[in-house]
Image (cartoon, helix red, strand yellow):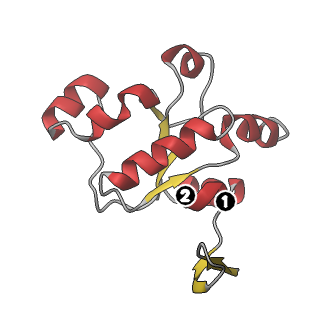
Amino acid sequence: MLRWQRGWAGAAFLPVARRTMAGAPTVSHPELRSLLAAGRARLFDVRSREEAAAGTIPGALNIPVSELESALQMEPAAFQALYSAEKPKVEDENLVFFCQMGKRGFQATQLARGLGYTGARNYAGAYREWLEKEGQR
């Protein structure tokens, strides 16, 4: 859906794609399930270590949002040593960040995109939605 943005005087600028949470690209629960089933997404749980230890989406790598900027700027070998996982590449698609309710996932997505990770997306439904939907299966 397109909407028109207006400047301070009310003049219409170019239309922009509507995205939830002020411009962060998002992924829905059905899309996330499909991407995971196809092995086409990397999940990053940006909640605290304690929150992630209590339960997370299978396959997610826990990097608390407070560490994310430094983690994404590490050399690949240092990232591997610290997180026991391959560091994402800036050109990777479907780097999906999530938290408990959506806010930290949004912040993480914006941070990653600011560092050049153009494939960064936010699972806005977050872990709370995952539990609600997956608990019914």
SS label for mark 2: loop
The image shows residue 58 at horizontal and vertical percentages of 56, 35
Residue 68 in the figure: left or right of residue 105: left
Residue 3 in the figure: left or right of residue 13: right
Location of the N terminus (image quadrant): bottom right
Snapshot quadrant of residue 126: top right
The amino acid type of the residue labelled 2 equals Ala
- Residue 92 in sight: yes
On screen, residue 10 above or below 58 = below
What is the CA distance from the residue labelled 2 to the residue labelled 1?
A: 7 Å
- Residue at image location 60% in from the left, 29% down from the top: 56
Q: Residues within 10 Å of mark 2 (few under 14, many from 20)?
A: many
On screen, residue 85 above or below 51 = below
Location of the C terminus (image quadrant): top right
Q: Residues within 10 Å of mark 1 (few under 14, many from 20)?
A: few
Residue with the mark numbered 1? 20
In this orientation, which residue lies closer to the viewer: 56 or 6? 6
The disc at residue 94 is none
The image shows residue 53 at horizontal and vertical percentages of 55, 17
Residue with the mark numbered 2? 24
- Residue at image location 58% in from the left, 75% down from the top: 7
The amino acid type of the residue labelled 1 equals Thr
Snapshot quadrant of residue 8: bottom right
In this orientation, which residue lies closer to the viewer: 114 or 32? 114
- Residue at image location 73% in from the left, 34% down from the top: 128
The image shows residue 61 at horizontal and vertical percentages of 44, 33
The image shows residue 5 at horizontal and vertical percentages of 63, 77
Residue farthest top in this picture: 50
- Residue 26 in sight: no
On screen, residue 131 above or below 97 = above
Residue farthest right in this picture: 136
* Callouts 2 and 1 close, C-beta under 8 Å: yes
